Amino acid sequence: MQKTLGKRSGFSSLPLGNAGFGGSSKEMAKKKHLAANILLVILFAVTGNILLYFYKSGENYIYYWDIGGYWIKAMDFTALFFSNRSAALSSLRQSLSSSDYTMLPAVLYVFVFKFISSSNMAFVMATYNIYGIPFMLLFYAFCIRELEISHIAGRFAALLFIFTFTVVLTPLMGGYLDVSGLAVAAVILHLAWRWKFVSISPARIAALAFLTLALAFLRRWYVFWIFSFFISFAAVKALERNLRESAYCLISLFLSGSLWILTLFIFFREFLEKIFSFDYSTAYSAYDFGGLAYSLKFMLSQTGILMAAAIAIGAALLAANRRKRSIALFFILQSLICLLSFTRIQSLGIQHLYLFAPMFLFFGVSFLTELPKLFNKPLARRAAFAFLLALAAANFLSSYVLEAQPALKLAGPLFSQKKMFRRERGDTDEIRRMADSINAWTQGRKYTYALASGDVLNSDILSNCRLPQTRYALKKLLYTYDVDMRDGFPYHFYLADYIVAAQPVPYHLEPGSQRSIGIISDAIFSGKAGDSLKIKGTFELDGGVAAYVYEKVKPYSREFTRLIATEFENAYPGYPFLHENNSIYTRFYDIDMPLGTDILPYRDNFVIAQNCDSGRFKLYLGGQFDEAYLCMENVAASSKTSVLAIGDSGEALLDTGPLELTQRELFTINASGLDFIEFIFNEEQAEGYDISVEIKLK
């Protein structure tokens, strides 16, 4: 009779060959068992790195928005950390309070970027090893314990499923850093189901509060996972027969949740206020593509029909097991709460499926381990095992291997519909030529605005086209307001001396959600800007997109600005805050101010900004203004400056004195009755400051 390892499981009858796990002593068996597990883990980790390396090598691409944002944050934080550590830590803390994309996940990249490489390949591979592999191994250990997987074949199957699961891999390979939260979520699950909180333990209560805080700080939308975890875990434990243990668990969860909220209230109140008071559903309404029905269909398309069926069967098999029913109900309830609450704000994207990845993986592994138990004959069990492994492999090939597509073409939606082949674009040289041309025309002193928000062209692509060698490929590039309900109308468009527009107009959402791009583009292409603009250059991009660079040679007419304002108002009549301009907000990325720039923001109010000479900036007020605000933020090391604001009669309105900022500072200036305000900057190590001027209308 062939020897088998440990407890009986769905794979207990599979032969171990020459592995020798039935050695002459228990101690020898344990050592061989441990060695086999270590070798399995090393095998999958090394194989994963090799495959990822070959996937990333040779990519010719420009990374932007979410797929490039955290890469850039990690580079910026690394530079700041090694030049001014106190400023880096201050920046980190501020981001925890106020930013949707905090700097916390970027902290672990500083030594990789400093001593190895800051390339996108290094970033993605570091993400895989820093966050991806730890999550996979932690969740693998969680599955071994909760599903009682003792046989080596079962463990191999579990590792294969976890390491090849496309829902986890695809966003990671695409450059999303949201996977960082999964590792923390795995620790929370591991500890919660091990401790079960059957007694009041202050240390465990504090540990759960700390871990959930870390998860929320890594990515704000993991708050949905946190709330659903507390509710679901409490609900499942409340149903258990031991009333005393249930009461202890509920008390522990309540105390931990209260500590979580109290910590935010005391130290990160802005974070807490944004969670409960910010209208995310309105701001992100452009990302609502169909509510719950759309998101369910999206989930199915990402997993594939066969994998979704396997997960559903695994859930049913686990729910039918009386000893494991509670954990099955927990995952079902948690995922349901996550889905219903998240889809009230927006539809799911590929990164948001991380909210459900633990449930998918747990039920998928349970399918691998529980289904073979239904077959009595060893041959049937082996056949089921082989089929499940083939399913995981086919889903992986369908998602990432271009050469496998012809063979899998007829399978269609049976496998994941999200493809992530090596990314290539044929116009990277043309994009860089456009950025270089604009820099030559502006001499690095005039501002550019991009009327584009698509995958072929957007402001991030122009800015990032020479990363990692050059941080800002296009100098003086203004931020594009591309999601109307989130950003409002971009009045700082009128600051730009150069406009990049394209035909067909590049969108990444429905055009009706990006009117601030479409309305202005249509007005320019139809000639309504008159002789204010002239074409400086044309560039041919991928997908048949033609990009045109316009130079503003004279101020826009009032008819042009009123036309745009009227069309935007008519597009959003129920949202006056989007288009009723209560301020003129002008953001500058260094001390060099634009020359003779007209700002025609709203109706009959306007200002003219003019650079008098080096370090002096005069703001002429063409309307009735109450207050002006000077906003300064240190974004680089060893920056120091001082600002003096003088009114038209020569009186000093503001004197900041020498500043060495470690955070954002806002200075208020009384602008009532003034014709102009002159700002005088002492440019002592001034490069590296973000400086903005905001004028409030009466």
Image (cartoon, grey):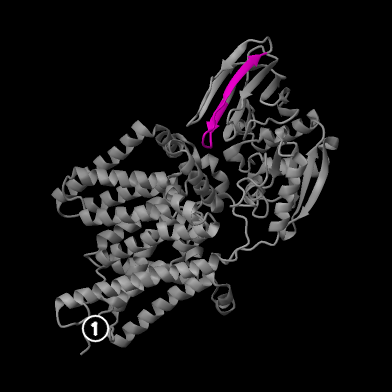
Residue 414 position (above or below residue 169): below
Up the image or down, 277 lies above or below 539; here it is above
Of 506 and 670, the residue lying toward us: 670
Q: How many marks?
A: 1
Q: Residue at x 47, y 36 (%)?
A: 278
x, y percentage for residue 479?
Answer: 63, 40
Residue 208 visible, this orientation: yes
Write down the region rendered in magenta. Answer: 631-647
Q: Residue at x 71, y 33 (%)?
A: 495
> SS at mark 1?
loop
Which residue corresponds to mark 1?
A: 20
Q: Is residue 293 visible?
A: no
User: Residue 387 or 497: which is nearer the viewer?
Assistant: 497
Q: Quadrant of residue 363?
A: bottom left
Residue at figure coordinates x 46%, y 36% from the top left: 87
Question: Which residue type does callout 1 highlight?
Answer: Gly
